[in-house]
DNA sequence: ATTTTATTTGCATACGTATGCAAAAGGAAT
DNA sequence: ATTCCTTTTGCATACGTATGCAAATAAAAT
């Protein structure tokens, strides 16, 4: 009677064990044993273009299916010294422009058998850490979306032969990274001319961040175009590329009831839309007539009837395609690609 | 003299090597050699809580810095049989609800030293492939956002001891996955009661997908609540959880000028906002008065003045926290978590 | 000074796959 | 039948790290 109890305990434990963390996935050796071949053959059966006879491959695949075998990508990457993974450092979830770009990247990468290892960085300070860790993963490329990388880490990437792409940002350092942006100068100039052509005089600019190349380039070209026409430098506020920041910036710009701007160029659409809503809700200003509002990006929301935002487009799909082409080595020597967009005039200006 | 030349050639070659594609990153062995210790010691110096004296660790870290050494995570994961990576399968980039959730996941994971391997799946058919590949990466968990997994693959994950979380979806199969959702039934019921309390009679429902548990649950509860009050089953259209689909669905529901609904419940906010805009732009209907519109999620956009959408909230941060807690093993035996939200009444209904 | 105990260290091996190399097998050509 | 060429196959090793184990060292207790 007592023995019986002991046996039950034993059984119980072994059942537990097979369910427990110690479960071992089948390896290429297991498959090889079952199929009566060598481990090398199994490896070749799962490697496109490897030298193996069709019938043997078939036999191996059958054995693999039976065991539920699946090659361990970590082991493969360890040998090959590189993984089919691209590191993406992402900052701005709030902005649909980047969400869309991430979506496009995912799709383009998938078509090339690449995966995305996603890192998020709220501050530029953390970007370096993230990229450093990406190196440990032997990623085959790094994409920085709307964040800046220190030249120290850019150099480290270069040393490890890992291409770095800055998406929608540029860098002063030469050869630190491949950059792909929209045409910030042309876009800002087009917006400025449009404002001037429609008789705007009291013009304001809402920046993103002061340390963002994108915002600085748009600002510089915008200011220059206005100066060319003899206008004074526009009033200016910083919206931090966020809705919340843009609302505050709008309040600041329009606080003085006696001297409100009659045109506002925001460094991106997200902020421009926030400005439009704030003007309507808090100042009773309907954008388009009394005050023109323009953005940058042409995110899908810009065309929604509620906003009908005049903006300069950044062709996300093209930009992503250029970045991916660079990573795939399908491109020349150029280090900075500028993808042209176009002025899209809607009701807001 | 000649020896000297040879030495220079040697130097030259090694310099060349370090620049060329075949550049080899320093390994733990290199660091060990430089620091005069064993490779094991290097490994221990980089492993928290490992047995190593403080001064030796210091010496090793110094040598590592000098060489630019960084542990190869692939090798580590290979030995340990698991990587600090969580696979996320993501479908809906268009919907800010999921973008926000992804952001929260990224942050919670980062705090626990976990990384995200991102897969996108436009169709449910591809989800199985993606998850299968995730298994090859020895991820420590799988998160499915707004997609369904076949029970076959769920079983395979279970066999490999990889926890699976379905975010904002449920499954009929027992123990196939941990599911975390908002309170679809309570939410839909609350919306229905709100419609009834405000005297709505010709009520319509816009579904997401027919095979989405979320949409089905909301629909069932909504229909049941209306039936309880003796109303006929609402008119119904499918919006595919997309803006485009929702616009078409709205047109279909309001096509007959003689018999337009006076209330519309959309399975999520994204569609509800599209409906609001379509009603305004194409039917001259201002939501709130002539026709009530309600959504589900309470995405940030719902509170924007342009929409002021009545909705039932899904607390993203809580939902994500529950999912992460499950993965981290900080939770009990429950298989399905329902996080309550609340009815948020704004101007649209 | 000696024993006991705790801590640190290196050795050796394992993780699961890819791949250079040489042997074997299969075909083609003579 | 023999040679030659092509394809297939297995052996052995390497990738870079973690870890059990025993030896060595340090610290504590007697």
Image (tube, coloured by chain):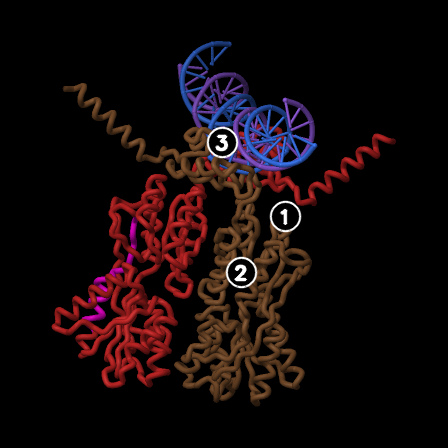
Chain colours: A brown, B red, C blue, D purple
Q: Residues within 10 Å of mark 3 (few under 14, many from 20)?
A: some
Magenta-colored stretch includes residue B252: no
Q: What residue sits right under mark 2 in the picture?
A: A145
Query: Residue B164: x, y in percent?
Result: 34, 47
Magenta segment's dominant SS is helix
Q: Position of residue B16 (x, y in %)?
A: 73, 42
Above or below: residue B277 compared with residue C30: below
Rendered residue at 64%/58% (across/down): A331
CA separation, marks 1 and 3?
31 Å
- Looking at the rendered structure, the secondary structure element under dot 3 is helix
Residue displayed at 21% across by 73% down: B234
Alpha carbons under labels 3 and 2: distance apart = 42 Å
Residue B191 sits inside the magenta stretch: yes
B52 relative to B292, above or below: above
Q: Which residue is mark 3?
A: A39
Could you tell me which chain the residue with mark 3 belongs to? A
Q: Mark 1 to mark 2: distance in Å?
A: 20 Å
Q: Earlier in the sequence, mark 3 or mark 2?
A: 3
Provide the residue span drawn in magenta.
B177-194
Percent coordinates x, y for residue A163 in the rendering: 61, 52
Q: Position of residue A341 (x, y in %)?
A: 58, 73
The reply to whether residue A185 is in sight is yes
Quadrant position of residue B103: bottom left
Give me the residue at 30% from left, 69% from top: B238
Q: Earlier in the sequence, mark 1 or mark 3?
A: 3
**Residue that numbered label 1 is attached to:** A161
Which mark is nearer the camera, 1 or 2? 1
Tell which of A22 and B174 is nearer to you: B174
Q: Is residue B75 above or below residue A344?
A: above
Foreground pick, B191 / B209: B209
């Amino acid at each position: 009677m007592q023995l019986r109890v002991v046996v039950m305990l034993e059984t119980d434990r072994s059942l537990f064990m097979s369910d427990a963390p110690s479960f071992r996935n089948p390896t290429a050796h297991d498959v090889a044993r079952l199929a009566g071949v060598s481990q090398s053959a199994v490896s070749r059966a799962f490697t496109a273009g490897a030298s193996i006879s069709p019938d043997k491959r078939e036999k191996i695949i059958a054995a693999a299916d039976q065991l539920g075998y699946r090659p361990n990508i970590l082991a493969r990457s360890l040998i090959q010294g590189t993984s089919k993974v691209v590191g993406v450092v992402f900052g701005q979830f709030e902005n649909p422009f980047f969400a869309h770009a991430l979506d496009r990247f995912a799709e383009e990468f998938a078509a090339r058998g690449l995966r995305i290892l996603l890192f998020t960085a709220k501050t530029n300070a953390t970007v370096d850490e993230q990229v450093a860790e990406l190196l440990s993963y032997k990623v085959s490329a790094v994409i920085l979306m709307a964040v800046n990388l220190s030249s120290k880490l850019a150099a480290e990437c270069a040393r490890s032969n890992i291409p770095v792409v800055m998406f929608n940002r540029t860098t002063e350092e030469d050869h630190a990274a491949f950059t792909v942006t929209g045409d910030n100068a042309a876009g800002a100039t087009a917006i400025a001319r449009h404002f001037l052509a429609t008789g705007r005089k009291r013009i304001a600019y809402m920046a993103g961040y002061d340390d963002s190349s994108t915002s600085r380039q748009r600002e510089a070209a915008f200011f220059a175009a206005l100066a060319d026409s003899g206008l004074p430098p526009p009033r200016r506020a910083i919206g931090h590329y966020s809705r919340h920041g843009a609302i505050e910036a709008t309040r600041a710009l329009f606080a003085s009831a006696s001297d409100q701007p009659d045109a506002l160029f925001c460094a991106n659409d997200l902020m421009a839309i926030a400005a439009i809503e704030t003007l309507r809700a808090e100042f009773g200003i309907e954008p388009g007539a009394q005050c023109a509002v323009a953005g940058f990006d042409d995110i899908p929301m810009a065309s929604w009837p509620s906003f009908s935002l005049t903006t300069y487009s950044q062709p996300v799909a093209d930009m992503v395609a250029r970045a991916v082409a660079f990573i795939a080595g399908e491109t020349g020597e150029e280090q900075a690609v500028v993808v042209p967009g176009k002025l899209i005039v809607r009701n807001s200006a």
